[in-house]
Image (cartoon, coloured by chain):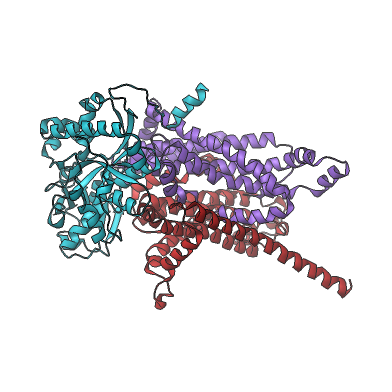
Chain colours: A red, B purple, C cyan
Amino acid sequence: MTTLTLTSRVGRRVGRGIGILVRNWLLFFALLGVWELATRLGQSPFFPPPTEILTTSGKLWFSGPAAQLFLTDTVFANVLPSLGRTLGGWLLAGALGVALGVMLGRSKTGMDYVGPLFAFFRSVPPPALIPVFIVLFGLGPGMQTGSIIFGAIWPVLLNTVDGVRSVDQMKIDTAKSFRTPRSHWVRSIVLPAAGPKIFAGLRLSLSISLLLMVISELVGSYNGIGRSLMDAQQAFDFPLMWSWLVLLGLLGFGFNAAFLAVEQRVLRWQPTRNGRL
Amino acid sequence: MPRLLRALAGLAGFFLVWEVIVQAGLVRKEFLPPPTVVLVTIFEQFGETQFIRDLIATFLAWGIALLIAVAIAVPAGLLLGSIPGLRTATAVVIEFLRPIPAVALIPLVLLLIGGGPEAKITLAVYASLWPIMFNTIYALGEIDPILQETAKACGTSRFRTLTSVALPHTAPFVFTGVRLSANIALIAVVSTEFLAGAKLGIGNFIMQASTGSTRFDLVLAGTVVVGVLGFLINGGLEMIGRRAFRWSTVDREAVS
Amino acid sequence: MLATLGACGALGGDDTSKASGGGDGALEKPKIKVALLPVVDLAPLRLAQEGGYFKAEGLEVEAVDAPSGQASMTKMIGGEVDIAFSTYMPFFVAKSKGAADIRLVADSVSASPKSNAVVTVPNSPVRTINDLAGKKIAITDKNTASHLLTVSVMKDHSVDTSKVQWVPMALPNIVAALSSGQVDAGYLPEPFLTQASKVAGATPVVDIATGATQDFPLAGFGALGSFVDKNPKTLAAFQRALGKAVRDAADRSKIEPMIVKYAKVDAETASLLTLPTFGATLDARRLQRVPDLLLQTGVISAKLDAAPMLAPQAG
């Protein structure tokens, strides 16, 4: 390969890459423009234009004192507790799910006993869990975190079991013949092999956690993002309501994107992952 | 011991533990009725017209929403996905809209559409569009180019290519999307029922039972029944998927 | 086709009742839906239903349950019900924000002494009104009477309201939340007030109908401007029947059976309840106190005139 061909190849690659980037974001901004236009033309109080939402959001979250990084009290009183509950619940669910999943996956008959039971638990629509938790824990952070954990654990658990079981036979036999110690076996062979499935489960778990956070707050809480959303609607302050809504969208998108990035890095060595979304 | 017996044993074990916890007084009986009470309540409730109507209302709303979602999302996905330039661009936009928890829209929807079945269905349709559309678009991108080249070489019309090549190959993916959406739609319907204080629906039943009354067995009964509904929906769709797409060699689990 | 119609019924949607005539003076909409709360304020309406007063006017009233005045009004704005019962605050807030063309169609109650109170329970840290600062207080929803009257009465006593945690929940839950310690105090109207004292040993911290909020117009019925303008005869029929029931409500023996049946309390509790002052006809000047309070507490930013919001009052 002459250098000429290489650089032109790279150049074309980069050009294509930028082209794709520009095109993707172009559509996104075009849609934003359409949104702005439509709301300005429609003049409905329920749908304020995005620019108004932006200014309201700025005032809501970023007009605080410099000492607090310009964050307002609202951020500390509502956003952070909600985030804490969501992420905390998700992490706990993840840890429990992986631990239990590994145990059950490695046991030959374990899943036979609890498989259908867990499949049932997974099928309960997460919002239906909330009244149960309300009666058990009352209204408040305990109920919310409990609901989140109980709702988010199943994808992780079941996917972990799936992943652990799919470690191929050759690896198992090799390890046995080398008499690999169990902890090393689990840590260095099983978990990495089950990695993709576990991560898929964790990703689903994350979106369930977010969903449960919102709805548990809508139903019973005195602070939080969901609560603030509801309050704003009840005060008929629509720019405010949309600010919280957009925040939720950004959180959902951000969590997903961040998680995907982490997943890409951690599972980079997997041969089948290249070129996958 | 065959698997079915083991499953039943697991179920029995779970009930046993539950019963013991309650009888031993670790949890108050009013707060966590033992399984015997709950099962009896479930049987009783199936004799109550109100409960059956609630169940049917939820199921119907779910079904209608899913049908509408499929009817909109599949053609839209096929259209958007087959135009190469548009494919990646819309994928990005969908990636933005998809993670917004549809339940966050409930307060707004209640104000605009009221709390009746229209609200439930609208929200469920909105929430269910994205997985199906995304999967359809993704699937179109995954068709083996050799097949498309072959079709073109044989002089197949564009439309024919779509129906004979694209559609069968995307079908398994689309179905996975539909399965996911089925779940999401049920969640959306039940959530709206909670917050709307709708007239009918299992979500409403559960919510009313949990407000102030001391009938926690009703709450659990409702939760169990809606869980069974979800379980049947999941299992049913999984079975259909396996049967109908047995021929497909594509790894359907790729997109979740 | 029949299946679809049947399905619509099974879904729980409205059975759109096109005017099937009936009744004298041909009401535009003989069947209407009213969103209600499970409080004694609605006893006269129930009396009008049970006593056939509505029927005598050619009207059929269907009651729809709502967990709070806010929810009730939301149903009305969303089109699910025609008339909503609520404490007055949400109506005025919605109108001030231009969210909907809200009109007030009938009065329901004003705060009479001891009919509404903020209560506490023996094992709560709240003893006097000063203890309310920074605590968890249960209300039905933000910007309703339960919220704002508590704020007003706390301000009257110079108690700081800024750090209070307002926990919204449906009225039946408030009693349970109080006894289990999830909240430190709660706003309760009747019948929950008497119920709470019986069941949870609740004692009033402060009576709402004192100070600036004495004899305050508490709750009433609202509807959208479109409904009011299109159905004047229906509205008048509603108001007449309601007015008659309110007049009869002066006789406690007529009202108590309604309370027993609909508020789900036993006859003994019903006899112990402190009834609010029932009213039917709206008076703009009295009603003005509500938006003025809203302005005062900073909930709305500009003065709102109540008079234009009143629908024509019958009788």
Q: Is residue C9 visible?
A: yes
Question: Could you say which is closer to the camera, residue C154 or residue C291?
Answer: C291
Q: Using the image as rendered, state which of residue C131 and residue B236 is in the foreground.
A: C131
Residue B236 lies in quadrant: top right
Asked whether, in this view, residue A66 is left or right of residue A15, the answer is left
- Image coordinates of residue B211 in percent, x first then y, are 31, 42
Which quadrant of the figure contains the N terminus of chain A?
bottom right
In the rendered image, residue A143, in percent from the top left (x then y), is placed at 37, 52
How many numbered dots are placed on residues in this image?
0
Can you name the residue that lies furthest to the bottom here?
A67
Q: Position of residue B224 (x, y in %)?
A: 43, 37
Decide which of B153, C51 is in the foreground and name it: C51
- What residue is rendered at 39% in x and 27% in y? C17
Q: Nearer the viewer, residue A111 or A223?
A: A223
Note whether residue C184 is visible.
Answer: no
Residue A235 at what x, y percent from top left?
Answer: 35, 54
Q: Give the side of residue C55 with respect to residue B34, left or right.
A: left
Quadrant where the C terminus of chain A is found in the figure? bottom right
